Image (cartoon, helix red, strand yellow):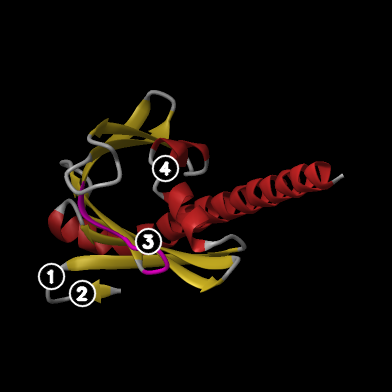
Amino acid sequence: MTNSGTGREELTVPVDVGVPAEVLWQVVTDWPGQSDWMLGTRVELTGGDGRSVGSTLRAVTGLGPFGIADPMEITEWTEEPGGPRRAVVTHTGHVVQGDGVFAVVELGPRRSRFLWTELLDLPLGALGRAGWPLVRPAFRAGVASSLRTMARRTEERYRADERRAGERRRAGDG
């Protein structure tokens, strides 16, 4: 989708995950932990606590020694118990520019939705705008694949933690 008012391209990819919203929020905002599930990307915290406005991050996406650096700054952080959870990062690099929005919505006590939105200022002017329709499907497919991986791993870890907690409770009762 194009937002003609800003010249930005918007891409949103949702995934539903069988865990409570607070668990999902902790996973998707564990910036270095994203390296474990984000396709071809390494992420590091470069400043601040990673959970507040002004914190900085750096992602590098690519293969082996070849990659595109994507420095970012957290420009919005909303985390209310039982309420909305949203982080906005502003891409501050030379290649990737715009905003990334991470939002978690509670769907039930043990189900939540993660929405990853990119509001991109495309590089290379008219060439970038012309090429976006060709790049967009592959970019979306990569994000969707990463989110499926994250969802599967998060659900597996949550179920294992729940089993262990149940076993500890039973051991304490016996």
Determine the CA span between mark 3 and mark 1: 18 Å
Amino acid at pointer 1: Thr
Amino acid at pointer 3: Arg
Circle 4/circle 2 CB separation < 8 Å:
no
Amino acid at pointer 4: Asp
Residue 20 x %, y %: 55, 62
* Image: 116 above or below 162: below
* Image: 140 above or below 42: below
Q: Residue at x 71, y 46 (%)?
A: 165
Determine the CA span between mark 3 and mark 4: 26 Å
Q: Given this view, does label 4 or label 2 mark the residue nearer the observer? A: 4
Reading the image, the residue beneath label 1 is 6
Left or right: 60 in relation to 13: left
Left or right: 157 in relation to 91: right
Range of residues picked out in magenta? 74-83
Q: Which of the numbered marks, if any, corresponds to residue 47?
A: none
